[in-house]
Image (spheres, helix red, strand yellow):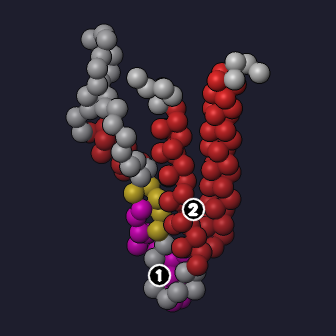
Amino acid sequence: MDLFSGTINTLQQSLNYASVKNQTISSNIANVDTPNYKAKDVVFKDVLNNELQSSLTAKRTNSRHLPFENEPRQSFNVMTRNDTTYNHNGNNVDIDKEMSELAENQIYYQSLIDRLNGKFSSLQMVIKGGR
């Protein structure tokens, strides 16, 4: 029996993604002046495409339902950007882009935390009998 109907697990995976993205952006910012440092990105699209091309299975109650796999997997990878150079020292960190992505990721992370708190508040209300 799945007590939370997968919502908590999905929020957990999303928080893991946001945490890794924050660490990656922080590393890029910390190395903005490091010669020959290549910036890193956390990518989701490549993993999604690979998963869509692999065999996915699940219990289907109707033959018209699409098959899919319900196993939690890491749905993102950290990739190095080797295709650009912004600075004279071989570094390709764009500080404006990194700061913008950091702000965006912080908003995303906070929205996930708010949603998770809402789920737990709802459960707490049910456990207390609506009081």
Instruction: Tell me the number on the disc at residue 15.
Output: none
Amino acid at the residue labelled 2: Asn
Q: In what quadrant of the picture does the C terminus appear?
A: top right
Of residues 54 and 61, the one nearer the viewer is 61
Q: Looking at the rendering, which quadrant does residue 128 occupy?
A: top right
User: Secondary structure of the magenta portion, mostly?
Assistant: loop
Percent position (x, y) of residue 88? 53, 88
Q: Looking at the rendering, which quadrant does residue 99 occupy?
A: bottom right
Residue 127 as seen in the image, left or right of residue 4: right
Number of marks drawn: 2
**First reached walking from the N terminus: tag 1 or tag 2:** 2
Q: Which residue is mark 2?
A: 22
Q: Which residue is mark 1?
A: 37
Q: Residue furthest front?
A: 128
Decide: few, some or many residues near mark 1? Use Cα within 10 Å; few <14, some 14-19, many ≥20: some
Element class at badge 2: helix
Residue shown at 52% from the left, 32% from the top: 7
Q: Residue furthest top?
A: 62
Residue shown at 40% from the left, 73% from the top: 82
Instruction: State whether residue 47 is above or below residue 100.
Output: above
Percent position (x, y) of residue 13? 48, 45
Q: In what quadrant of the picture does the N terminus appear?
A: top left
Q: Residue furthest right?
A: 131
Viewer-side label of 1, 2: 2
Residue shown at 64% from the left, 24% from the top: 127
Instruction: State whether residue 81 is above or below residue 130.
Output: below
Residue shown at 41% from the left, 52% from the top: 76
> Does the magenta run of residues contain 80?
yes
**Residue 104 is at least partly visible in this image:** no
CA gap between label 1 and label 2 equals 18 Å
**Residue 88 is at least partly visible in this image:** yes
State the extent of the magenta-drawn residues as a range: 78-94
